[in-house]
Amino acid sequence: MENAFKISGFSFKNTPLEIREKLALNEPEAKQLMQFLNQTVQANDLMVLSTCNRTEIYYDHELDLNNEIATSLSLIKGLNKEEILKHLTCTSDSEEAVNHLFEVAMGLDAQVVGDIQISNQVKKAYQWSADENVAGPFLHRLMHTIFYANKRVVQETAFRDGAASVSYAAKELIEDLTSEFKEPKILILGLGEIGEDVCRNYAGTTKSVTIANRTKEKAVTLGVECNFPVIDFNKALETLADYDVIVSSVAHSEPIITRDMIVSMNILSHKFFIDLSVPRSIETSIEDHAGALLYNIDNIQSKASEALNKRIAAVPDVKRIISETQEEFGEWSREMAVSPTIKKLKNALEAIRQEELKRYLKDGDSTEAKVIDTVTKSMMQKIIKLPVLQLKAACKRGEAETLIDVLNDLFDLDKADQKVK
């Protein structure tokens, strides 16, 4: 692959959560970083992917830009540059970088195999890149190839079937339970890691979701992020009857939702309780009361585990699809590498044609000039056709460099190119 495509960044594989969350980038910050790299070191094909699991900067540049990226991140986030550099790694091999982006976008390189959210996160990152006009032909082609591969994965495999994470399985369960509800009201109690993920899974949907947390500041921050209303934690416990689904993800030694609370609610229709806490935060005896239905973490994990096993079984098919689409992209990329030579060859022949036209048409009339111009253009196109086909064929064989050198020597292409310019 004849380019200098690289990745600098960090992920859940090598960087703890407390560092990842400090360096997570929102849209304005990601765009600021891309513009910094584009303007200061002329990096191209820039894209920033920042999720809870990774922050990765993709770029085309001859050099490893970890130092420049750390500089920009330190300015954007107000953190120590040297501390950032400790966690930044760089993948300098272009083929390895391309393969990594494929695997990230497909969900192979995720904490939860087949993560359904990552595809949309990658699309969003690409959109930010396009918005800032820092995506070149290479990145555009690469991303559309990835989207095509992703479409094949969805259509041809079971890799995206079912919910393989506890939080997403909880969301799917809620969707199943409330399928007959016109506008179900959902309360999420507690914003530990799973509670946060459930909220984020609902971000951008039209569902009526309210959140509550014992530390209200955290609820307010997440509420702004997801555009959900926030209610005081104790008030939420007092108004459980207002909601159709109550999701509890509260770390507590004793249940916070008891049978007595449910009895006092005077339930008139089914109310669903989902307990994602360990230890459990909802008394199991609430199901003794008519209308109260309880699902616990084991129910959810069983659903997630079944989906995960299906996804793992589909991994070989996903890798096959990636390999096939990467091969097609590789051929295009290699052809891109010979495009400058093809352009120079055309320029060289055009320079010869123009010189000869000037020499022989000094005394010719306009009609003759037009005919000769048309004929010589047609001849030039026919002459160049075979070398271009041979160059493209040499690309597929991995022998393009030899032919490029021969053409350069035969036509002195650099000199001819300068003449046309």
Image (tube, grey):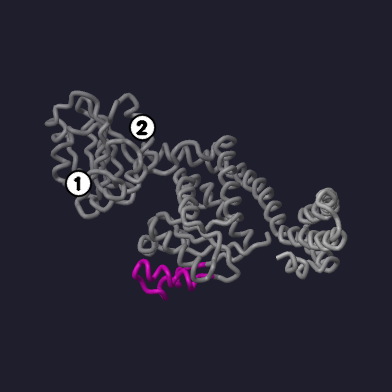
- The residue positioned farthest toward the bottom in the image shown: 82
Disc number placed over residue 20 in the picture, else none: none
Count of marks overlaid on the render? 2
Nearer the observer, 26 or 231: 26
- The verdict on residue 72 being magenta is yes
Q: Nearer the viewer, mark 1 or mark 2?
A: 2
Q: Position of residue 17 (x, y in %)?
A: 38, 60
The part of the image, by quadrant, that contains residue 30 is: bottom left
Helix, strand or loop at mark 2: helix
Q: Residues within 10 Å of mark 1 (few under 14, many from 20)?
A: few
Q: Quadrant of residue 3?
A: bottom right
Please report the residue visible at 16 percent of the width from the left and 46 percent of the height from the top. 232
Where residue 312 appears, x then y in whole percent? Answer: 54, 43
Quadrant of the rendering where the C terminus is positioned:
bottom right
Give the residue number, with chain letter if any, for mark 1: 254
Residue 257 lies, in percent from the top left, at: 19, 40
Identify which residue is drawn at 60% across, 54% down. Answer: 137
Kind of residue indicated by mark 1: Glu
Residue in front for this viewpoint, 343 or 310: 343
Q: Which residue is mark 2?
A: 175
Give me the residue at 23% from left, 51% from top.
220
**Given the image, on which type of amino acid does mark 2 rest?**
Glu
Q: Position of residue 394 (x, y in %)?
A: 80, 56
- Farthest residue to the left: give it: 264
Q: Is residue 107 left or right of residue 375?
A: left
Q: Nearer the viewer, residue 95 or 74?
A: 74
Q: Which residues are magenta?
A: 65-89
